[in-house]
Amino acid sequence: MSLSGKTAVITGSNSGIGLGVARELAKAGANVVLNSFTDRAEDHALAAELGAEFGVRAAYVKADMSQGTECRALVTQAADLMGACDILVNNAGIQHVAPIHAFPVEKWDAILAINLTSAFHTTAAALPLMRKAGWGRVVNIASAHGLTASPFKSAYVAAKHGIVGLTKVTALETAQEAITANAICPGYVLTPLVEAQIPDQMKTHNMSREDVIRNVMLDRQPSKQFATVEQIGGTTVFLCSAAADQITGTAISVDGGWTAL
Ligand code: NAD
């Protein structure tokens, strides 16, 4: 399956799932625009390496997904650089864990802005470009927490349920065009975001790293295995394929059976 000639913009893609998705899209032949809020030489080098490895055009564009104007500018800048924005992957996300009564307001605001509102802005900027091109794909990286809840993750769960809703509305507004919008709902994927939670969990539960992974993190993941960034990338590539032309408005779980419980 070739995405040759298509351009993909992936938010929050200098690490973790975003980078994994960008790699799989580039492997399938798409030109890719990587993004995060930093502007380091290594961010640009990452794009150059990816382009060279897969023989596609690749660029890095700095934009802070907590700022609406920067979200919209990412899409327009990407289109200026590459000539299009055919595939939009809304992936940027952060996490904070605390009970509601003690949840810091600034963390709530940041999570809602980066994990949910950014996708509204990028989608608003990208849809006119997709309509002009006569083809488009919006893939929102939600979470098993877009379909189910856990205590102490109020902002994250609210944002992820919100992005599943936004996905459905995007799908309905584009249903009669060659544009689809779907959410991918990963269970636990071992990325820097998850890795950073392990020491805290070890302290809280007084457990070894292995016990935290198996008995706390993967407690609700019946496969007892992390999903991989390649699997999330592969699912994204599938959603961009012709086989998925009639798949729109869905939330696809890649969670080892978590939401089947
Ligand atoms: P990660 O921390 O490795 O990556 C997050 C990415 O978002 C990074 O590239 C980071 O630079 C970027 N980012 C953060 N704040 C940003 C901002 N203000 N502007 C632009 N970019 C910003 O985390 P990850 O695990 O790869 O998570 C990626 C997405 O997948 C998130 O939306 C997360 O909620 C979702 N997800 C992750 C898991 C998991 O287990 N890892 C499970 C389900 C869903």
Image (cartoon, helix red, strand yellow):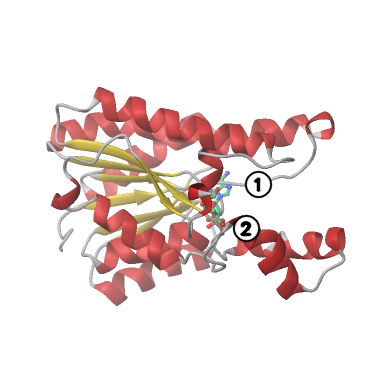
Location of residue 52 with respect to 160 vertically, above or below = below
Label total for image? 2
Location of residue 170 by image quarter: top left
Q: Tell me the quadrant of the picture where the N terminus can be found.
A: bottom left
Element class at badge 2: helix
Few, some or many residues within 10 Å of mark 2 (<14, 14–19, 20+): some
Q: Where is residue 231 drawn, in percent x and y?
A: 39, 64
Say what amino acid the circle numbered 2 marks: Leu
Up the image or down, 60 lies above or below 55; here it is above
Disc sitting over residue 193 in the figure? 2
80 vs 206, left or right, is left
**Is there any visible trace of residue 65 in the rendered image?**
no
The residue that disc 1 covers is: 95
Which residue corresponds to the image point at 49% horizontal and 51% vertical from the top-left? 12
Residue nearer the viewer, 32 or 115: 115
Q: CA distance from mark 1 to mark 2?
A: 8 Å
Q: Does the residue at mark 1 contact the one at mark 2 (Cβ under 8 Å)?
A: yes
Which of the 4 image quarters holds residue 58?
bottom left
- Measured as percent of width and height from the top left, residue 256 is found at 48, 60
Q: Amino acid at mark 1?
A: Gln
Q: Quadrant of residue 90?
A: top left
| Residue 142 x/y as whole percent | 48, 43
Q: Residue furthest front?
A: 261
